[in-house]
Amino acid sequence: MFGLLPNIGFPELILILALALIIFGPGKLPEVGKAMGKSIKEFKGAISSTQKDIMDDIEKKEKA
């Protein structure tokens, strides 16, 4: 299966960064980056927790 952004290269990253700089401005960009990083970390934690719960349920059903 293809990833979310399968063909993103250096020129595309520069374009995205330039657009973010125009939209948010240089003062807000670090805050936006920090908020996005925190959101991604929380999302990964929630996925990991859900995956662990599912695996635990599967193991319980296999033992029963």
Image (cartoon, rainbow, N blue to C red):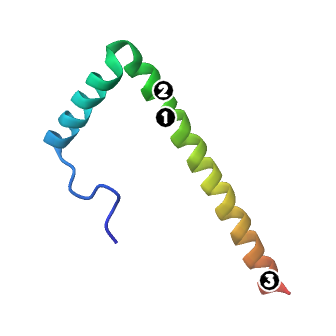
Residue sitting at x 18%, y 47%: 9
- When the figure is inspected, residue 44 is found, relative to residue 24, above or below; the finding is below
The residue drawn where x is 19% and y is 35% is 15
Please give the residue where the numbered disc 1 appears in the rendered image: 37
Residue drawn 25% across the image and 36% down it = 16
Amino acid at pointer 2: Lys
Q: Which of the two discs, 2 and 3, sits closer to the camera? A: 2
**Whether residue 8 is situated above or below residue 20 in the rendered picture:** below
**Contact (Cβ within 8 Å) of mark 1 with mark 2:** yes
* Residue with the mark numbered 2: 34
Mark 1: amino acid: Gly
Q: What is the CA distance from the residue labelled 1 to the residue labelled 2?
A: 5 Å
> Going by the picture, which residue comes out furthest to the top?
27
**What residue is pinned by disc 3?**
61
Label 3: few (<14), some or many (≥20) within 10 Å?
few
The kind of residue on which mark 3 rests is Lys
- Label 3 to label 1: alpha-carbon separation: 36 Å
Q: Quadrant of residue 12?
A: top left
Element under disc 1: helix
**Quadrant assignment, res 11:** top left
Task: Give yes or no for contact between labels 2 and 3 (Cβ–Cβ under 8 Å).
Answer: no
x, y (%) of residue 58?
Answer: 73, 78
- Per the model, the C-alpha gap separating discs 2 and 3 is 41 Å
Task: Tell whether 16 sits left or right of 43.
Answer: left
